[in-house]
Image (cartoon, coloured by chain):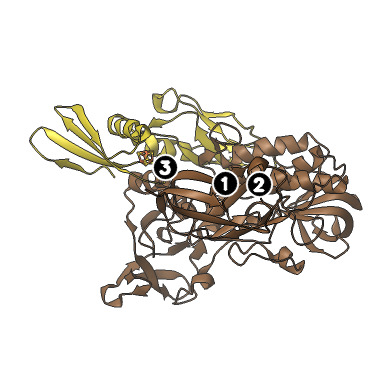
Chain colours: A yellow, B brown
Amino acid sequence: MNATVAEHQDREISRYLCIGCPMGCRLEVEEADGDIVEVRGFSCRRGEAYAKQEHIAPQRMVTTTVRVENGLWARLPVKTTDAIPKELMWDLCEKLHELTLKAPVKMGEVVLQDALGTGVDVVSSRDMPYRES
Amino acid sequence: MLTANVDRLRSDYDVVVVGGGPAGMGAALAAKEAGAEKVLMVDREKEAGGILLQCIHPGFGLHHFKEELTGPEYAQRYLEQVLETDIDLATDSYVLDIDKNNRVKLMSGRHGVREIETKAAVLAMGARERTRGAIRTPGKRVSGVLTAGLAQKFVNLMGVLPGNRAVILGSGDIGLIMARRLTLEGVEVVGVYEIMPHANGLNRNIVQCLHDFEIPLHLSTTVVDIHGQDRLEAVTVAPVDGFTPDLSRSQTIPCDTLLLSIGLIPDNELARQLNLRFDPVTRGPLVSSTMETSKNGVFACGNTVHIHDLVDFVSQESELAGHNAGLYVTGQQPPPDNVRLVPGENVGYCVPQTISTDRDHTIYMRVRKPMENCVLRLGDVYEKKIRYVFPAEMVNVKVRPKFLQNFHGDNLRLDVVPQEG
Ligand code: SF4
């Protein structure tokens, strides 16, 4: 939820839903001339920090699957080793869709190195044993 | 390797664990550690790991492993521990029955139908998803209507997409997570419809699975009709007032897939066959503080007992069940419980349902309604302030014997009430 409303010429309020706990506080970040001037709506410090991070540079861990041949299953679950900028999520998934691996694969094995130049690797999140197809 | 091809199947065991998911693995390991020599874990899938194997997203293990893992990683960590022991693992196998003399009837792809003697059993079969019948969704019987968890298995393990344009009914976490999964796989997710005025899933999932992908969440709205010949063609949704749909404001949405994310119930078929006593609220078997059911030597843990929201607590509870199954077969059982816990104000249920005043206990419970600044009371022997409680989040409380020592009654009431003043 990051609806941005122009209140004055140079003041912008962005809204976020805090994910820190089930309270789900509705957070507001007010920006003036490109700087955060106020964060509102949080009930604890974690919410304040989250609002700033989400506002400045939202990041996400990405988990998806990659096609695998001769495996116990047809898909191998993979994950980024760290969070990547949120806007790169789509491109990364598209890139991973192009891959086809061959079983066996080990947990932690690098599937895609330095994904999209982020410095973050994509690794397998399980062993995938070989199976005669 | 997640699949141990354990060939050995003995004719008698100390402990047979039914289910190889997180609950089963935790119980089998703990039983072994507590002194059970011969332990068998039975799973109906082709590998152990249970539902975790298809939950490819992160968010698991923060309590148990002190780091954030994906489901498959959590499963593999556990299974690696199991494989370091001499616990036997029978995959592709079903427990058909456990008779009153604790003889287990097993059907296995590898071993055929076998009868096995066991001193103790642990039920760890997990949960089932509520289906369309459970909420009596009207309309046609067409293909394309499936539970969110089944769709998750199709997509994440088998690499099969359920359709091209999906509507999700229910805002449980599995549904929210599938909204993101399907979107990333190129399926158009039209929206999530929730009959309640609030979402059921975690905020984290609302933000990262819906908002991130601009998938709308429609609260107080439900599916009132299902259209199509063989395959689903559209659903009609309408806003509800309480539980009564306002058909004058209904809307028909073309889609070929309807995912149901309307909750889980304990998989208790085997428990019913065993004639165990049940808790009508959890719909799982009643358990004592050692996780023993109403039948001696039969223990239960995990989603078979009550639905958990964190696998970490499943692990905790299963270790307790397995530990006590191990003590049971080695004749070291603790004294029986002497106090019954009674859910009182704003407490839907609690597990275990009985405790003993001579030792530590972790009591898990669910509240009926959200409450802020409240206090959890255990009779007048113990109280704890809690900032907030939500029905979707299990509450757990540790009680030490020093609070219970001076209690001499039979029933202890559990209440969650507002703080005074
Ligand atoms: S601000 Fe604090 S209290 Fe509010 S949702 Fe976030 S973590 Fe919870």
Vertical arrangement, residue B226 with respect to residue B11, above or below: below
At numbered mark 3, what does the secondary structure look like: helix, strand or loop?
A: loop
**Relative to residue B8, is residue A91 drawn left or right?**
left
- The number of numbered discs placed on residues in the rendered structure image is 3
Question: What percent of the width, then of the height, locates residue B391?
Answer: 47, 55
- Figure quadrant of residue B354: bottom right
Vertical arrangement, residue B223 with respect to residue B288, above or below: below
Q: CA distance from mark 1 to mark 2?
A: 8 Å
Q: Which residue is mark 1?
A: B382
Question: What percent of the width, then of the height, locates residue B381?
Answer: 59, 48
Sort mark 3 into few (<14), some (14-19) or many (20+) by Cα contacts within 10 Å. few
Sort mark 1 into few (<14), some (14-19) or many (20+) by Cα contacts within 10 Å. some
Badge 1 amino acid? Tyr
Indicate the quadrant of ligand 1 in the picture: top left
At numbered mark 1, what does the secondary structure look like: helix, strand or loop?
A: strand
- Could you tell me if the residues under marks 3 and 2 are in contact, i.e. CB atoms within 8 Å? no
Q: Which residue is mark 3?
A: A21
Q: Is residue B186 among the parts visible in the rendering?
A: no
Badge 2 amino acid? Leu
- Could you tell me if the residues under marks 1 and 2 are in contact, i.e. CB atoms within 8 Å? yes
Given residues B416 and A37, the one toward you in this image is B416
User: Which chain does tag 1 point to?
Assistant: B
Q: CA distance from mark 1 to mark 3?
A: 26 Å
**Relative to residue B169, is residue B52 drawn left or right?**
right
